Amino acid sequence: MDDHPLSAADGGARPALAPDARPYVPPGASATAAVVLVGTSAAGFAILAVQGQVGPAITIPARDLAVRVAITAIAFGSLTAYLGFLGSAIAVPVWTHRACRNLRSLGRPGHLSPAWAAWSWFIPVVNVVLPWLAVQDLWTGSGGRPRGRLLLGAWWVAWLAACAAWVAAGFAPARLDWVRPLSQLLLAAAGLLLAVIVAAITRLQDARAAVDFPAPH
C-alpha cells in the first residue's frame, strides 16, 4: 500500500491554485522556531508542575540543600516556561501564517485566510475556536491522515483545560493548591502536543511540495 500523502486522497492530481496563491516557501525556519520555543515552554511548565507537587516548602533564607534545589528549579522552570511562552506567542502565529499561505500554493486553501489564521490566536473569544479550525485545515490540506485528528483533539482539549485551570487557580482556596500544578501540567502536555503537530504538518507540506513542485534535473 502506498503511504504517500497524495496516494489515496487525490490520486496524485494537483488541484487548481487559489487566485491569490504565492510560490511555495518551505516553512522549516518558522516551524523550527515554533517547535523549539513551544518545547522549551512545555519543559518549563513540567518542571514547575513537578516542583509544585513533590518539592519541599520554600523557606527564606534557604539553609537546606533540598530547598535550594527547589528554588533553583522554580527559577529555571519559570524562566523557560514564560520566556518560551512569550516566544511561542510570536513564533506559532508566524508559522501558522506561512503554513496557511502554503496551502494556497498547493491548491488546497483552508477556511481562513493566512492573516485571519495568524491573528486568530490573539483575539479573545475567537481564539477559542479559530486557531483550532486553522490547524485542522492545515492538517487536512497538507495530507494528514484522518486518525491524526485524535492528536489535534488531544492538543486542543489540553490547551482549553489548561487555560480554564489557570484562571480557576487564581480564585481557588488554599485547600485546592493542586489546581495551579494541574494547570502547569496541562500547559506542558498541550505544548508537547503542539510541537509534534507543527513538526508533522511541516513535514507533510514539504513532502507534498516535493511532488507538486519537483526540483529541475
Image (spheres, rainbow, N blue to C red):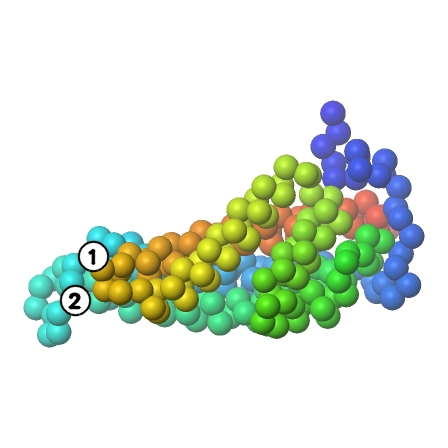
Q: Nearer the viewer, residue 210 or 3?
A: 3
- The amino acid sitting under disc 1 is Gly
- Relative height, residue 48 to residue 79 (above, below): above
Residue 212 spot, x, y in % from top left: 84, 48
Residue at horizontal 60 percent and vertical 54 percent from the top = 198
- The amino acid sitting under disc 2 is Ile
Residue 214 spot, x, y in % from top left: 83, 48
178 left or right of 88 in image: left
Q: Nearer the viewer, residue 134 or 191?
A: 134
**Are the two marked residues, 2 and 1, in contact with CB atoms closer than 8 angstroms?**
yes
157 left or right of 145 in image: left
Residue at horizontal 56 percent and vertical 63 percent from the top = 33
Name the disc covering residue 55, or none.
1
Residue 199 spot, x, y in % from top left: 60, 51
Q: Is residue 150 visible?
A: yes
Count of numbered labels shown in the rendering: 2
126 left or right of 26 in image: left
**Residue that numbered label 2 is attached to:** 58
